[in-house]
Amino acid sequence: MSEPQHQDLTDGTERLATHRDVIGLLGLIAYTELSTFGRLAADAANAPTLAQRHQLSRHAGKMLARHERVLERIADLGGDPEAEMGAFDGIFDDFESRTPASTWWEGVLKGYVGHGVADDFCRLAADGLDDDSRDLVLEILSDGVDSERSATVIADAAAADPVLASRLALWGRRLVGEALGLVQTLLAERDGLSRLLADGASHRTDAGTPGAADATGSAADRQAWVFSQLTAEHTRRMARLGLAA
Amino acid sequence: MSEPQHQDLTDGTERLATHRDVIGLLGLIAYTELSTFGRLAADAANAPTLAQRHQLSRHAGKMLARHERVLERIADLGGDPEAEMGAFDGIFDDFESRTPASTWWEGVLKGYVGHGVADDFCRLAADGLDDDSRDLVLEILSDGVDSERSATVIADAAAADPVLASRLALWGRRLVGEALGLVQTLLAERDGLSRLLADGASHRTDAGTPGAADATGSAADRQAWVFSQLTAEHTRRMARLGLAA
């Protein structure tokens, strides 16, 4: 595999490469959290009951708090929070336009699936960072958010209504397909992310993680590996909702 | 004027009446803040620029934090937060359906004007509480929110575009008219709020505040007085935006 930028940066200046890459990844996370906040808050405002409005609004508030922590972290690391976030402005537009939700439930599931895939992708990318930076990103991605609880609104409704559950299961498959399309675009267009995933894959090979070998190969192999990881997580996520993946 | 509930409660049990009324008013504030949060967050998600998305999202987050503080306060006072908030569920539905925003700017101004009138109304009602409770409500209503800053998105745009400014000024007049209609409904349907305003008016007469005399009279006089207060605040608010009221 030939990636000139990667070669240059690891050539005696690995620290700098990691530093820039972690800031870039934090920019993606900050942008994702802001988008998730907006989506969740809008879903909350349109929720069928006041209790659901309240629950989803609180969850949105946690996303915004996380967003703020990420921005602070970018500044701590010497980055420009607005610029790092702005580098990803619009990345969800295509995904959004391709997945118009026809019901409130579809909208909520879209947020849940989309945010889940985004978080998982950022976790995989974080594997390519040095230990301290990786811990930082993983702490941010798991801080203050109980995914199980955030999903209860959907899980409860699906359990009570088999027809809704069946429709949402179908919708979930559509959503994850579109989300993987977005990941594909990011991998093709953002060298930093691709580099982190390649580095992470080599770390995993060292640790003997099964399946990691493929990710150290060509860009196509790496993408296939990322997709398999994201799909597996998606399947687990849907199962937690009581939906067939 | 004859208000049996008021007579019963002030008959040697004034503390209890105040206690119930403050909890009721906090329920209205909690519901208002949750609604404002949802509106602001949705406006934020659709903002023209990332900087505006960010600014409005942050402002929405402050509203949600305020909402949480109010709920805590209701619990501290022995009330049921969900029930007190739920007592006002749906009060904005009619206002919303009567004021469909045709542009993003109209939606933002609607939130600003609607929330401003709601806050001012709650401040007037708080005058009818005992000193401690009133301080509590006023502290909540002014805590953590810099109205001037939240309005900069509109003010900046209005300053740059006279046609937009003129349209928004017209829209603002429409909005305040509909907001006063909502206040009228609340006064007619919620005895506790009407009682607080009557009590507040008598306090103000004691203090020699000009114009307060009318508010101690009939329900119609009191409503006229409330409208004049809310309209005056609205005029000041529009002026801060650079818009003609």
Image (spheres, coloured by chain):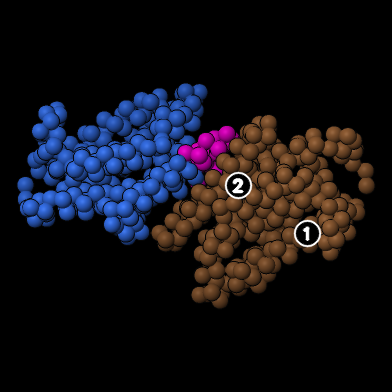
Chain colours: A blue, B brown
User: Toward the viewer: A207 or B159?
Assistant: A207
Residue at 40% x, 44% y: name it.
A66
Name the residue carrying label 2. Answer: B33
Residue at 79% x, 57% y: name it.
B226
Q: Amino acid at mark 2?
A: Glu
Task: Say whether disc 2 or disc 1 marks the residue closer to the N-terminus.
Answer: 2
- Density class for disc 2 (Cα within 10 Å; few <14, some 14-19, many ≥20) is many
Give the magenta part as a residue range: A42-59
**Chain containing mark 2:** B
Residue A145 part of the magenta-drawn span: no
**Is residue A210 shown above or below B221?**
above
Q: Amino acid at mark 1?
A: Phe
Q: Are marks 2 and 1 on the same chain?
A: yes
Residue at 65% x, 36% y: name it.
B74
Horizontal side of B218 relative to A44 (left or right) equals right
| Label 1 secondary element | helix
User: Toward the viewer: A98 or B222?
Assistant: B222
| Label 2 secondary element | helix
Q: Which label is found at residue B227?
A: 1
Tell me residue A43's x, y (percent).
50, 42
Instruction: Give the distance between the C-alpha atoms of the residues marked 2 and 1, in whole angstroms.
Output: 21 Å
Tell me residue B196's x, y (percent).
80, 46
Tell me residue B214's x, y (percent).
88, 59
